[in-house]
Image (cartoon, rainbow, N blue to C red):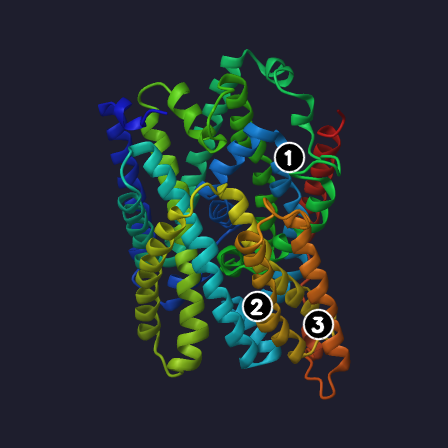
Amino acid sequence: MGNIIERLTGLDYAIVAVYLIILIVIGYRASFGNKKKTDETLFLADKSLGWSSIGFNMWGTNVGPSMLLAFASIGYSTGIVAVNFDWYAFVFLMLLALVFAPRYLAARVSTMPEFMGNRYGDSTRTILAWYALIKILISWLSLGLFAGGFLVRQILGIPMWQSVIALVSFAGLFAFAGGLKAIAKVNVFQMLLLIAVSLTLTILGVNKVGGLSAVYHSVPADYWNLVHPASDPKYPWYAILLGYPVAAVAFFCTDQAMVQSVLGAKNLEQGQLGVNFIGWLKILSLPLFILTGILCYILFPHLKDPAEAYMTMVTNLFPPGMNGLVIVVLIAVLVGTIGSSLNALSTVFTTDVYAESINPNATTADKIRVGRITVVVGCLFAIVMALAIDSIKGLNLFDVFQSVLGFIAPPLSVVFLLTVFWKRTTRKAVNVTLSAGSAFSLLVGITYLWVLPPSRYNFWPHYLLLSFLIFAFLLIVAVLISLLDTSPEIYTPAENEIRDLPKATSRVKIAWILLTIVMIGLYIIFNGH
């Protein structure tokens, strides 16, 4: 696989330069456009985001470079089954929009630990804050940066440490200067660009194969099935059905990096429509990302490593002048993900750790200063971690990402689902699940990934199923602790809180009904083989 850099023309360099300038202008205007700077802007964008910004921003946070690579690579080796990770998500996005978002916005919180802290006290808030920080650092920043460095290294042929440092400093700049508002503005622009470039790649690929029906008939029939039989070793239907929700609830409904866009909404309706909009955007994963991998399988069936599918398509199909755009899009996707996670990191640390325990009398200026220091520290940590991950060879990026999430997710999902759906949940149950439950979950994860890996030991269930089993176990334990607690401390909402929970407007209801109908239709269409 040749480096793109050898094919770059003056035009490519010009495109990259123009893009960087546009990006810096957008970021600068969002950061310093109006003089009334408060900590709200840095962390939650003044609560000024409309539905399209929220949708694009959450999507931009969600579509990391790891996803681009991974989806193309799974498309290359197994067909469209991976799109379940985006299409099945609509159920949990609906849960976020209709169940969690009204409660988050009604509670007027700026972080998830703060929300749980209001319900169960400071101990819960502190545990969750550290939990959130570790999660953002590892799963978002380090893994995201590693995938980005991997790509940049593949494109430019420069060593990992250089590409990682260049990427982080660029993304860090936006989080440092303008916070969520700058990132949201920049993300809308980047996502439109991503759609345009990916679509171009898909169209060029389809034409090269000779039209859609040729594409359809050139791969094994089961490539077009969303639901694989239970005997399928990689993605059996029951593993996705049971295991994916555990990660999805934690990811879409409780993850600061995802939820912060909704918390920054102008009002609840905009937030709910924004979340609905991501559901629609996620449909695009098939034509934009997965299909690239399937086309690559038809055109270049003998790749050494499926992870190179995306870049192989790019280097072979794009005419000169377009390669610059690809570099731009990859930088874009990265800046989006890393920028959002840095912002989430600094929001959680500043609000839940610094202003809560270290310096309760902190002024706005103090908070902004600490927020910025956090961004810098997060950058440094991510660089070290990404280089460490790079030294662990031969791991399929996506599976590592998914399996790590699979083991971080169960305690979070248990706690947030219980607090919203079961009034009897006690503080002790919440704290034990978050501390001991997480330790248990991660221990199982480490055993699974490194100590007794499934490649050598056959007794393990599918990793998604394993995640579900941990979830079920923790759920039962949490319920038992709540029921057996002799002096239960439970959260009792004020009367007006339940009565005043805002109802979904008719626009929101219509949007979700339409999305549900379309998603069910898609599942029916892609299973008729």
Extreme top residue here?
210
Per the image, the residue denoted by label 2 is 439
Residue at left offset 41%, top offset 25%: 314
**Location of residue 114 with respect to 174 vertically, above or below:** below
Residue at left offset 72%, top offset 40%: 237
Given this view, does label 1 or label 2 mark the residue nearer the observer?
2
Q: Which circle's residue, 1 or 3, is located before the other in the chain?
A: 1
300 and 87: which is toward the camera: 300
Q: Position of residue 528 (x, y in %)?
A: 76, 26
User: In terms of image quadrants, where is residue 117?
Assistant: bottom right
Is disc 1 placed on a helix, strand or loop?
helix
Q: Bin the neighbour count of mark 2 within 10 Å (Cα to Cα): few under 14, some 14-19, many 20 and up.
A: some
Is disc 2 placed on a helix, strand or loop?
helix
**Tag of residue 478:** 3
Given this view, does label 3 or label 2 mark the residue nearer the observer?
2
Q: Position of residue 309 (x, y in %)?
A: 47, 28
Residue at left offset 33%, top offset 70%: 370
